[in-house]
Amino acid sequence: MEYQATQDRVGFMRRLRRGLNGLGRARMCCVCGKTFFRFSKYRGGWKAFSAYLHNLKWTGSDFDNFWCPFCRSHDRERHLMLYFDKMGFWEKMGGADILHFAPEKQLAKRIASCRPARYVKGDLVPSREGVEKIDVSDIPYAAASFDWVLCNHVLEHVPDDARALREIFRVLKPGGRAVLQTPFASGLEKTLEDTEEINTDEKRAEFYGQEDHVRLYGRDLFDRIRAAGFALEVKKHKECLSSVDAVRFGVNPDEPLFLCVKPDPGV
Ligand SMILES: [Zn+2]
């Protein structure tokens, strides 16, 4: 009984805080359309991350403006949704064959609503119904099966990322597109990985940004993607989404947007 009373109090306080937050107008979620005072932080926000990552200008998620308090979308999926709006990608996903790794919940709902011809969701460790167990380094689909592969913030977890990139390239149809957003350190020339001293959760969090990351990508990330055969276009937020106020919509204006295309020899 005592436990239940505590849970009820916690639930009440949470709802009250969210209700008060919802009185604000300064921020807006592009997924659920609600306005509020502030997004929620991830793990104490950016200041909780190591000096090493700060010094090397590690860029990826917006840890200070991470969760929408209402629909729980996170900044990375909001950024992609705004990008897809701008590029007209939703229309192209209608009738397309799509493979989506580690599918973000809100993004997956939006993709499904576009009525793709085939929508495969995969994860190495599936935690939701409808998600297949798929290793991105060994994709169990034939070559040229998909028009789109979405693999957002996954490569930094994959031991053999070169192999994963080759696999993504293989299963794409010529002219197919891959979305491969990955955090990287713009102040680091060459990717940091395979370092014997970085062998504990604490060290991986300090140097790679999270205990389950296996590397810290440097500026060579883009060459690594191109090495798999992709034509890669990297656009800054302000080039691509100049009309989107990053602060209001809770997305990281320093996160560039990558578009990877499998060249079509027939074009
Ligand atoms: Zn929302």
Image (tube, helix red, strand yellow):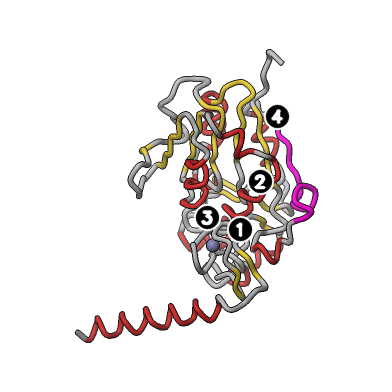
Looking at the image, residue 224 sits to the left or right of residue 102; the answer is right
Say whether marks 1 and 2 touch (CB < 8 Å). Answer: yes
> Disc 3 on helix, strand or loop?
loop
Other-residue count near label 1 (Cα within 10 Å), few / some / many at <14 / 14–19 / ≥20: some
Say whether marks 4 and 2 touch (CB < 8 Å). Answer: no
Task: Determine whether 75 is above or below 110 in the image.
Answer: below
Residue behind mark 4: 231
Task: Determine whether 105 is above or below 64 in the image.
Answer: above
The magenta segment:
232-243
CA separation in Å, label 4 and label 2: 22 Å
Residue that lies at the very extreme toward the top in this rendered image: 266
Residue behind mark 2: 85
Image quarter (top left, top right, bottom left or bottom right) of the C terminus: top right
Q: Earlier in the sequence, mark 4 or mark 3?
A: 3
Q: Nearer the viewer, residue 127 or 197?
A: 127
Point out the frontmost of discs 2 and 3. 2
Say whether marks 4 and 1 touch (CB < 8 Å). Answer: no
